[in-house]
Every structure is written in C-alpha cells, then in structure tokens.
Image (tube, helix red, strand yellow):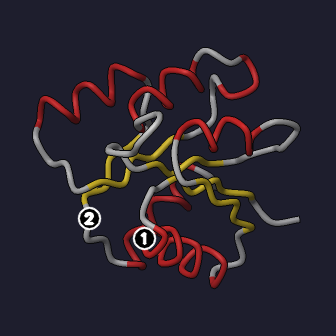
Amino acid sequence: MGKCILAVDDSKTMRDMVSFTLRGAGYTVIEAENGVAALRALQGQKIDVVITDVNMPEMDGITLVRRLRGLPSHAGTPILILTTESEQAKKEEGRAAGATGWIVKPFSPEKLLQIVAKVCP
C-alpha cells in the first residue's frame, strides 16, 4: 500500500494542485480545509506525512503542528509547511512548533515530490 499524505489548506485550488501532484506519484491523499478539519480527518487514519498551510481560518498551520506534536500517534510524523510566508521569524516559529520542513509557494511539483520522498522514504 502507498504512503498516505494529509494535505491541509484553506484554498481548494492549492489542495487540488498538491493532491494532483502527489496522487500522480502514487501517494494516497486526504484533504482538509483547516487545522480543525485536519484533526478530524486524522482520527483512526494512518498518515505518513502532513503538508499544511500556515494562514487558515479556525486553526492555523502552526497551531496544527503544535497539536499534532502533542499527540503520541503523530509525535514523529513528518510535517511540511507549504505557505506563502517566507519571513525567517515565521520559519523559526514553525520549526519551534515541530515542523519538519518549510516550502514557499508557489512550489514546483518536482520539488514537492523530492521533499516528500526525502522525509518519507
């Protein structure tokens, strides 16, 4: 069975782009529109990688990272932040929360696949 990735972004277009790229490479993708929906989607689901935006309604990506790191089942799950945010302070906040990596939008599909393969061999 292929690896399962949770893609979290409030933009349907961005979720579609990420999902299309990952599914084309053989990954299973579950989508969520914000951190609250992501936590619901994770219940009873084995996830190999989480890819999340930062700026979302209800629960932002950094809060989601913190919440995931607090769950024993996801303490070691690779979490990539895919966002338009590129400031160093924001990246450090993400790293401190427990993010595995940071990808700035717009992204190239090849780069996304390369990074996912690196954190989830």
Q: Which of the two discs, 2 and 1, sits closer to the camera?
A: 1
Depth order, front residue of 68/95: 68
Q: Label 1 crowding class (10 Å Cα cut-off): few <14, some 14-19, many 20+?
A: some
Depth order, front residue of 90/121: 90
Q: What residue sits 13% from the left and 29% below the top? A: 89
Image coordinates of residue 3 in percent, x first then y, are 75, 60
The C terminus lies in which quarter of the figure?
bottom right
Amino acid tagged 2? Lys
The N terminus lies in which quarter of the figure?
bottom right
User: Label 1: which residue?
Assistant: 14
> Does dot 2 land on a helix, a strand or a loop?
loop
Q: What residue sits 50% from the left and 71% below the top? A: 18
Image coordinates of residue 44 in percent, x first then y, are 88, 38
Cα separation between marks 2 and 1:
10 Å
Amino acid tagged 1? Met
Q: Which mark is residue 44?
A: none
- Labels 2 and 1: the sequence-earlier one: 1
Q: Classify 61 as above or below 68.
A: below
> Does dot 1 land on a helix, a strand or a loop?
helix
Depth order, front residue of 36/94: 36
Q: Is residue 82 left or right of residue 75?
A: left
Q: What residue sits 38% from the left and 43% below the top? A: 101
CB within 8 Å, label 2 to label 1? yes
* Image-quadrant location for residue 78: top right
Image coordinates of residue 109 in percent, x first then y, are 41, 78
Image coordinates of residue 34 in percent, x first then y, are 51, 46
User: Label 2: which residue?
Assistant: 105
Q: Classify 65 as above or below 66.
A: below
Q: What residue sits 59% from the left and 26% below the top? A: 68
Q: Is residue 44 left or right of residue 35?
A: right
Q: Classify 64 as above or below 12.
A: above
